[in-house]
Amino acid sequence: MSTTDQSSESSSRELLEEVVEHLASIYRPSCSPGEREAAEWIAERLNDLDTPARVEPEAAYASYWWTLATWCALGVLAGVLGRSRRWLGVLLGIVSGAGIADEISNGRRPLRPILLRRQTAWNVVGEGGDPSAERTLVLLAHHDAPHSGLVFDQTLQRKAGERFPDLIERTNTAIPIWAPVFGPPLLTALGLLLRRPRPVSLATLFGIGSTAAFLDIARRPAVPGANDNLSGVAAMVAVAAALRKRPVSGLRVLFVSCGAEESLQEGIRPFMQRHGAQLPIETTSFLNLETVGSPRLVLLEGEGPMFMEDYHGALSDYVAETAERAGIALRRGLRARASTDSIIPSRAGYETATICSVDRNKALSNYHWPTDTPENLDYETVEAAARLAEAVARRLAEER
């Protein structure tokens, strides 16, 4: 490696660490003053890199736990009332299961306007590359931080990885982690219909557990969120720095860091409403940098808390080909049961890809846990994600 290359690599690492460490020091739950402070700092940092950026306030909800706790409690009520009022219990069970499914899959969310007060999310939008270009690449990340909760403890997942390493290696689609949440009220309704008290009792117990889990999340503070998702923000800023040093022509690059992602995509939704008309589907691609600080860089093929949805378009293949050309190790084939900002543009018809990372157990390192701190990041993976995103941008500028 030449002295110039070593200097460039050192400079890139310093930039990544600067972004992560500074933002991790800010308490940034969704729609908070800290989220706004983080957004303003990111915009300022992009402006320092000659990437004109602004902060866009958007109306958003700051929580998912209160609405889901309410839907789960309704499912428990279905089991209790169903003992004496069977058809009422059936109805409440169906409504509860449908409400949970709607909430976690980015549906209409009818309870949010009733239970929650709209607050303000803070999105960052920067513009780099060639402003006059017809083709646009939107680099996505998010800067708000998640609340913790006992449900996010990874002890069982680590033990499963130690006990069944071959099975973990062969499994590319995550287990349906939301099934214990939306399943119990539907099981309650079915049990009442068939007059089977044992399934109803079991479902009611699970419903009590789910309700307690969301109330536990509500009472806990947000974590530093270094991996989820300051790693993605840092990689995005690093791409802006790289394009400043070596500009591209033929491609406009939007640097978008959303707020309120951790309240289930509350920032990207208004971004799409505001900017969708100026982003033609035929000439716009979305590349999401989501939790890229675990040891192994991966390319998600799709996501779905309820039903698996592969991302729209051929951008994933394009990213994988680019990684191979650049000599960047990238695991393919993984599908997530959580939701990310990618699903919103993908559903709208934009070609979309998500770069992520996992540990040896195919878990997101320190996911929603107090240990999600800068010192626990794998910066080599973050650097690889930034290099890959930059390579995708340069190739798009040359070929499309």
Image: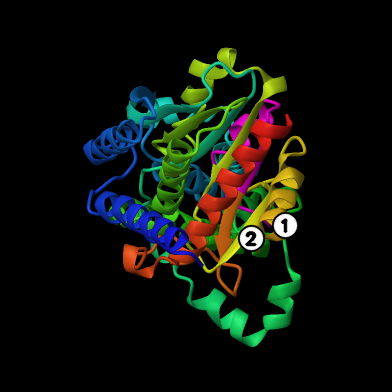
Residue 274 visible, this angle: yes
What's the mark number on residue 324?
A: 1
Judge left or right: residue 248 versus residue 63: right
Q: How is the image coloured?
A: rainbow
Residue at image point 26% right, 38% down: 41
Residue 94 visible, this angle: no
Query: Is residue 249 part of the magenta span, yes or no?
Result: no
Q: Which quarter of the figure is the C terminus placed in?
A: top right
Q: Where residue 371 sits: x, y (%)?
A: 34, 68
Q: Amino acid at mark 2?
A: Ile
Q: Where residue 207 sits: x, y (%)?
A: 52, 56
Q: Secondary structure at mark 2?
A: loop
Residue at image point 40% right, 26% down: 114
Q: How many residues crowd mark 2 within 10 Å: few (<14), some (14–19), many (20+)?
A: some
Write the start and end of the magenta stretch as one range.
334-354
Picture quadrant of residue 32 = top left
The residue nearer to you, when weighing 83 against 206, is: 206
Picture quadrant of residue 392 = top right
Please count the marks in the image.
Answer: 2
What's the mark number on residue 328?
A: 2
Judge left or right: residue 215 versus residue 367: left
Considering only vertical position in the picture, is 104 above or below 162?
above
Q: Amino acid at mark 1?
A: Glu
Q: Where residue 395 sits: x, y (%)?
A: 67, 39
Residue lying furthest bottom? 163
Tell whether label 2 touches label 1 (CB within 8 Å): yes
Question: How far apart, in angstroms, are the residues tagged by discs 1 and 2?
Answer: 6 Å
Judge left or right: residue 67 versus residue 80: left
The residue nearer to you, when weighing 334 against 286, is: 286
Considering only vertical position in the picture, is 3 above or below 245?
below
Q: Secondary structure at mark 1?
A: helix
